[in-house]
């Protein structure tokens, strides 16, 4: 066990909390700086004072994983509900089940086809296969043809990213499931759920260790970061470009605005309802109480969600998908590789869209390798 060693972690989201806990348990003292007034990062949740409903303050977060090591680690700090995420979408005046499955297809075509018949019909509608679709729209047309793509995905995608689908990488659509059965669960991982006391309480328990010092409302400047890196190893989970004080410009992010309203009873009957039509300005409505199906509340809290380009004062949510060959991203990745005694980890610091379990897995691997004497600039999964 290491002793008399100290490291600095910037950010108390899932990556920072995981790093801090594992390092502290190995005997390393950790100081965690968090610029916001709360822990948990964008997974932060809290109770609505008026209704008692648990609110996902930065939009819906549903944990799902096939990594038993990640689940076992988190189970030390929380119990998970058996919530299974199911999404519906409003398109062309109707409600449809998503992801696209046999119910969606038969509803769309007005048929009662078998899976094989549906595959055969879809084969007649798909665009000719190319080896590597150049953009999201080409990927969609190969997967599902024009009509399904235009109804469910084109408008929603362009609202979410603020860009034409022809300018977005095909990899975005590859994340979305498309099924020839009647399974309407959004995720199929073996372990799913939501912390029964919320993500914030889970994060709090992760940081409850005598070798962890938490400093909230503690933003750090680039100069302070460099100083921390000279004194002890620094784990940076904030935006990659902010570490270098935006010297070459800002990497593009999307941010979210939420319009909250309350109602009596049940507003929409599910946790998340997407809105695919491009002329509807919001992308989805979240009804938070459905994330805790065992709880009962007379009132309900809903959030309409609007996506837009992030400005300097905004909280960054989604890195605008780019390739590693993008000149601006390439600049910051090179600068990071040249920076000694600093590890960049997490969605913002690696400028990637990652699921929660992938963030935690990266942090677990980086922490163990640091304890073993290795020092990484990025997690292995960065490539």
Image (cartoon, rainbow, N blue to C red):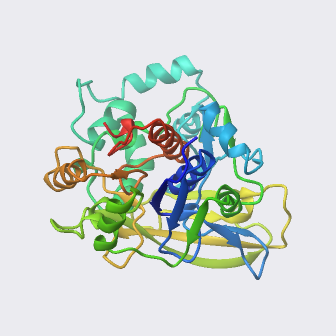
User: Nearest the camera: 32 or 88?
Assistant: 32
User: Nearest the camera: 359 or 263?
Assistant: 359
> In x, y percent, where is residue 101?
56, 34
Q: Residue furthest bottom?
A: 50
> In x, y percent, where is residue 41?
53, 64
User: Nearest the camera: 24 or 235?
Assistant: 24
> In x, y percent, where is residue 336?
25, 52
> In x, y percent, where is residue 235?
41, 55
Q: Quadrant of residue 204?
A: bottom right
- At 24% from the left and 70% from the top, the residue drawn is 245
- At 72% from the left and 53% from the top, the residue drawn is 195
Q: With respect to residue 7, does 133 lie above or below?
A: above
Tally the numbered discs: 0
Look at the image and tell me whether residue 188 can be seen. no
Look at the image and tell me whether residue 38 can be seen. yes
- At 17% from the left and 68% from the top, the residue drawn is 247
């Amino acid at each position: 066990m290491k002793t008399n060693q100290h490291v600095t972690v910037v950010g108390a989201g899932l990556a920072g909390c995981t790093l801090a806990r594992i390092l502290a348990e190995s005997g390393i003292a950790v100081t965690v700086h968090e610029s916001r007034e709360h822990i948990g990062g964008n997974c932060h949740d809290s109770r609505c004072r008026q209704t008692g409903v648990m609110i996902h303050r930065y939009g819906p977060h549903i944990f799902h994983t096939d990594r038993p090591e990640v689940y076992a680690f988190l189970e030390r700090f929380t119990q998970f509900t058996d919530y299974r995420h199911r999404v519906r979408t409003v398109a062309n005046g109707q409600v449809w089940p998503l992801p696209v499955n046999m119910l969606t297809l038969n509803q769309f075509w007005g048929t009662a086809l078998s899976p094989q018949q549906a595959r055969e019909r879809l084969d007649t509608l798909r665009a000719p296969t190319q080896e590597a679709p150049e953009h999201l729209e080409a990927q969609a047309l190969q997967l599902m043809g024009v009509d399904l793509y235009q109804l469910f995905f084109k408008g929603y995608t362009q609202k979410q990213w603020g860009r034409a689908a022809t300018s977005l990488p095909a990899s975005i659509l590859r994340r979305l499931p498309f099924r020839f059965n009647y399974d309407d669960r959004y995720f199929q991982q073996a372990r799913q759920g939501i912390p029964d006391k919320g993500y914030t309480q889970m994060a709090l328990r992760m940081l409850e260790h005598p070798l962890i010092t938490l400093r909230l409302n503690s933003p750090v400047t680039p100069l302070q970061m460099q100083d921390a890196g000279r004194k002890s190893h620094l784990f940076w989970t904030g935006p990659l470009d902010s570490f270098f004080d935006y010297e070459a410009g800002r990497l593009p992010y999307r941010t979210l605005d939420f319009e909250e309203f309350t109602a009596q009873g049940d507003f929409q009957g599910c946790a998340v309802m997407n809105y695919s039509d491009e002329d509807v300005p919001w992308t989805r409505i979240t009804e938070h109480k459905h994330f805790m199906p065992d709880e009962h509340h007379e009132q309900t809290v809903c959030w309409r969600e609007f996506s837009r380009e992030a400005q300097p004062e905004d909280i960054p949510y989604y890195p605008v998908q780019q390739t590693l060959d993008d000149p601006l991203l390439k600049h910051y990745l090179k600068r990071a590789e040249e920076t000694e005694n600093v590890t960049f980890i997490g969605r913002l610091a690696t400028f990637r869209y990652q699921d929660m379990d992938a963030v935690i897995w990266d942090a677990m691997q980086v922490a163990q390798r640091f304890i073993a004497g290795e020092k990484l600039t990025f997690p292995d999964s960065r490539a």
